Image (tube, rainbow, N blue to C red):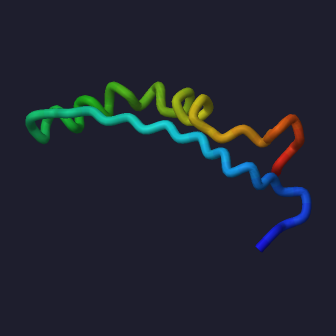
Amino acid sequence: MTLPGRSHDGTVCVCRIHIGVSWRGQVLASADHMRPWLLALQAVAANSPFSLGRHSG
């Protein structure tokens, strides 16, 4: 299926963060510590709306 005006170059950007913790209490403490940074991480990890110099939606 092709959509008019959409890019088909196959480029996908991904940001994955893996944190190893040894016990459940560390999971919650780590999540609470990262909470203020989540919006910034989401912004830098988002795919660009431009592909090959053209707006792709």
Horizontally, residue 56 falls left or right of residue 33, namely: right
Q: Residue 20: percent from the left, percent from the top?
A: 20, 33
Q: Is residue 15 left or right of residue 33?
A: right
Residue 49 or residue 43, whichever sits in front: 49
Q: Kindly identify the residue that appears in the image at 52 percent across and 30 percent down.
A: 41
Q: Residue at x 13, y 36 (%)?
A: 25
Q: Is residue 51 left or right of residue 45?
A: right
- Residue pushed farthest left? 23
Residue 29 occupies quadrant:
top left
Residue in view at x 84 percent, y 67 percent: 3
Residue 23: image location, x then y, percent? 9, 37
Q: Is residue 1 above or below residue 6?
A: below
Say how many tags the image has: 0
Outermost residue on the bottom side: it is 1
**Furthest-front residue in this view:** 9
Q: Residue at x 32, y 31 (%)?
A: 32
Image: 56 above or below 21? below
The spot of residue 48 in percent (x, y) is 72, 38
**Quadrant location of residue 35?**
top left
Residue 49's spot in the image, x, y percent? 77, 42
Check the picture and name the quadrant holding the N terminus.
bottom right
Q: Which of the two residues, 46 or 12, is positioned nearer the viewer here?
A: 12
